[in-house]
Image (cartoon, coloured by chain):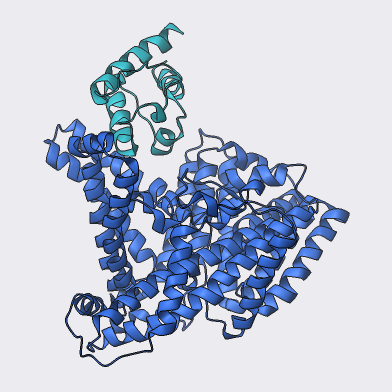
Chain colours: A blue, B cyan
Amino acid sequence: MIFTDPLFLFAFLPISLIAFYMIAYFFGKNYALAVLFISSVVFYIPYGIASAILLILALVVNFSVAAAITIIGDDNKNRRKIYLAGQAYNIISLCYFKYKIITLLFGPSAGIMVDIAGIAIPAGISFYTFQGAAFLADAYAREKNVAQFLGGLGSTKSICSAFGRYGAFVSFFPQLIIGPITYLSEFNPQIQSKRFLRLNPIDLAVGLSFISIGMFKKVVIADNLAPTVDIVFGAAHVGAEIHPLQAWIGALAYMGQLYFDFSGYSDMALGLARMFGLRYPINFFSPFKANGIIDYYRRWHMTLTRVIARFLYTPLSVAGTRYSMFNRLAPVPAHLLSLWLPMLINFQIIGLWHGALWTFCVFGLMHGFWYALETEVRATKWYKAVKKTASPIILGFIERAVFFLPLLLSLAMFRSESVSGGFHLFSQMFGTAIDARSLFNMREPVVMLTVAFSIIYLCPNSVEIMRRYRPAIMTYENKSYGPAFLRGLWRPGWVQASYISILVIASLYYVSRQPPFLYQGF
Amino acid sequence: MSEHQAILDKVTEIIRDLFDEYDGPVTMETTANDVAQWDSLSHVRLMVMIEMELGVHFGTSEMQSFKNLGDLVRAAAKQSG
């Protein structure tokens, strides 16, 4: 099911909410969490029985390994082996089911990505695998939440209820398909709290508001930018001549589409979880307001950034730094080993995480070089002197201006149907094909783009609007930008209810079209 | 306690050398936020320099878990003690 499906919104959600709060009232926490787990599996079944079996298998394997390494003492040598076997399962199943097509190594059918059994990539596999892997790492490090969360594992009943809790944590439907990738240290304290399971009207109000805002972003803004994007990128793929203005509109429209698609999803995920009384980590915080690529990755898909930084970049960088310091390498090779190489690998993995396509490879390279370069520039004495003397407003404006074009081009490459199509689009954007045949009527896309980019740059984001109600767990501290007079605060009331109703009505008008979320494919 | 102080003294020396623009106090409560030059990149460098100086070894997740210098000093003391 997808969040904008009326069946989900008007049948699945109310039924699971009522079941959750009723079971919680009569039978308590373990049964309520089991309801979340079961409803999440029901939510997942439309993605395919084979995928659902794989999900359950991943849960069983990870839970068993986590339970084993929690029970076994540190002095037992098998503890590390069991842990590594669990992580090997995660890595292998991810590589096999998501990238088995890699055997055809970026062949022409790579875009279809169908596995040998003929099923598509299991939905959400990278998200639940990462969440399970992070849980295992926490269990191995004996993070204090893990033992409390699993509880005593002495009887069959206690094992079953621990598995129910674990299943709810990893597969909870608001975050199962597209994240946010959540740590147990964020989830466990909430379910241990006395407030958990109590039906609180403000949770429903905040949750429904988030769902409404998110749905509007997705079905009204993102989906209305999609046709223009499809036309321009389709034309670029076949090498057609494109009027520079229309090429720019196409690239900008994709920027807007991706932004509102993912932002809309993230809002809906926060809202859905909140209706069950749970807060999730924030995944998306006005990324286009960033002042550079470093800031961008603290605002865009933040829970992926932190999980990749934790498991990939930092270990690589530590290894590179250790090697270069122990061997007293000269500054340049030392820097290559401790910064550039880990950074390039990090972004190559982020790129390929979206799928095995050359366009994602090029995107990863672009962002890897850019991130490393920006790190170097910000570390120079020259930049630090400029930062000390220049006006922060002017410097911020210049940084954002410098940031915009590479971001636009890299996202255009990300969307392109082929690398050559991407470069062709760049050539048309900076080209002179002013006599090219018009691909589409520009009035509507220009209006949509104006609306979209005004919201992006001028309005507070939904977490800021809702900040009175602590809508999300902050993954990174981010500065808030935009005109102060637009930073309204949401609170329950008739005026706010009318705004939300307008969003809902507009969304329902468009909802019948139902294109899937872009991140669903990653 | 004196062992902690001895470790902190050595760490202070490394911090003065690595973060040469910082001249504020270095205490058990000092965090990365107090020192402008102390970013994620220099954090790794600092950790490895401390490892080499004190002959200890930190895991990567341990390096990221230190909330202030006090945590680091205590972890180092635990290993050398």
Q: Is residue B58 above or below residue A439?
A: above
Q: What is the quadrant of residue A160 in the picture?
A: bottom right
Left or right of A366? Residue A457 is right
**Viewer-proximal residue among A422 and A383:** A383
Left or right of A429? Residue A505 is right
Q: Say if residue B23 shows up in the picture.
A: yes
Quadrant including the C terminus of chain A: bottom left
Residue A363 in percent (x, y) is at 29, 65
Q: Residue furthest right?
A: A26
**Viewer-proximal residue among A35 and A104:** A35
Residue at (32%, 82%) from the top-left corner?
A233
Q: What is the quadrant of residue A318 in the picture?
A: top left
Q: Is residue A340 above or below residue B18?
A: below
Left or right of A187? Residue A19 is right
Q: In this view, does A59 lie above or below A519?
A: above
Q: What is the quadrant of residue B48 in the picture?
A: top left
Quadrant including the N terminus of chain A: bottom right
Residue A41 in percent (x, y) is at 66, 69
Q: Residue furthest top?
A: B2
**Viewer-proximal residue among A115 and A494:** A494
Q: Say if residue A281 shows up in the picture.
A: no
Residue A62 in percent (x, y) is at 56, 55
Residue A479 in percent (x, y) is at 45, 45
Residue at (23%, 90%) from the top-left corner?
A436
Residue at (38%, 74%) from the top-left corner?
A254
Residue at (47%, 45%) from the top-left corner?
A476
**Count of numbered marks:** 0
